[in-house]
Amino acid sequence: MRVTVVGAGVVGTMHAWQAVERGHEVVQIEREAEARGASLRNFGQIWVSGRAGGEELDTALRARELWEEIGARVPALGFRPNGSLTPVRGDLELAVAEAAVARPDAAARGYKLLAPDEARAVNPALRGQFDAALYCERDAAVEPRTAQLALRAELLKSPRYTFLPGREVREVVGEHTVRDDRGDTHAGDAVILCTGAWLGGLVRELAGPDLPVRRVRLQMMQTAPLGEALTTSVADADSFRYYPAYASPALDELNARQPQPATAADHRMQLLMVQRADGGLTIGDTHEYEHPFAFDTLEEPYEHLTGVVESLLGRPLPAIRRRWAGVYAQCTDTTRVVHRQRVRENVWLVTGPGGRGMTCSPAIAETTANELGW
């Protein structure tokens, strides 16, 4: 079988990986020289802890297994099973963490509630004051800015894989052929469109105007090296408000009695933080849903995040080296892991994983491959 994959972000690249692994020929087409979207502008987290129970958690756990398997073959991914800690303060936040640990799927997530000294034994960099910390052993991380490059370098070792950058697919011709903006056609037995947040143009033409996917904008930043190891990913208790795994009467009580600070509420914020291979910290994030998106970044969210991080580390944050904004595609029904739609006889659109894209992409691609009988 010959498979054409359109898009070289992490979802597209994992589809190419699945097809090559199963013995098929793959042509992967990317409109940029390299992917520049949400696949690079994220934390690199393999984030199991906050996923909704059921299909979403099952997908994340399967993806976690696949990331570890692929990471063993491709060390340049920077895969590390670092786990995560979410420090909590006060009885209201503690009650939400306790409710999470009481979930029937808590063991599958690797949840444990740690006392402050136990949390610092796991991550000594957390010198700030807190009352307990929710630990998730199954969380992991990769290096987002280089993961696609590392995967592609491995794919290029196969004679069955071809990468065509700098070409925008403009048209689907017949049942399984695409034409790019250079006028070249690429025929195959299946076409997989993994176009990320690019939802106009050809995608709208094929899927129609009522595609149940929206675009979401975020702001993030990265620091200079911390000078010590941050041995786990770190979240703050505002992540309880954002991730579905933490829904409970205790969370309702937290929201009612202890609302977010104004800046965090206005920008729908949580803290997520991961240390990069160079020692710097990737820190975020915000969520903007209403179009048109701002074209600039705002300082108030960065100031808020800096304060939260410094309170957990108990020390000043290193200098900020980079700030950026990104946009990802999310299903409007956020209980859905991904939108997978056959838009022509042998053409499928796979988009809308939202903030789950980096986490779930290997399992999303595996499911596509299984459903299509690869």
Image: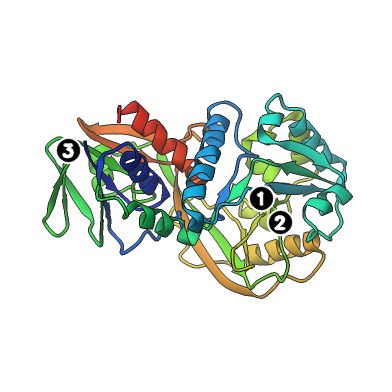
Badge 3 amino acid: His
Query: Which mark identifies residue 330?
Result: none
When the figure is inspected, residue 65 is found, relative to residue 286, above or below; the finding is: above
Horizontal side of 296 relative to 179 (left or right) equals right
Report if residue 130 is visible in the image. yes
Given the image, on which type of amino acid does mark 1 rest?
Asn
Quarter of the image holding residue 350?
A: top left
Task: Name the side, left or right, on which 248 lies relative to 66.
Answer: right
What is the secondary structure assignment of the residue under circle 3?
A: loop
What residue is drawn where x is 15% and y is 35%?
175
Precedes in sequence: disc 2 or disc 1: 1
The span from disc 2 to disc 1 (Cα, nearest Å) is: 6 Å
Residue 176: numbered disc: 3
Mark 3–mark 2 distance (CA, rounded to whole Å): 47 Å
Quadrant the C terminus occupies: top left
Residue sitting farthest toward the top: 104
* Residue 331 visible in the picture: no
Label 2, on which residue?
A: 231
Q: Quadrant of the N terminus?
A: top left
| Residue at 61% in and 58% down | 284
**Image location (x, y in percent) of residue 101:** 76, 32
| Residue 216 spot, x, y in % from top left | 48, 50
- Name the residue beneath numbered marker 1: 82
Front tag of 3 and 2: 2
* Amino acid bearing label 2: Thr
108 w.r.t. 122: above or below: above
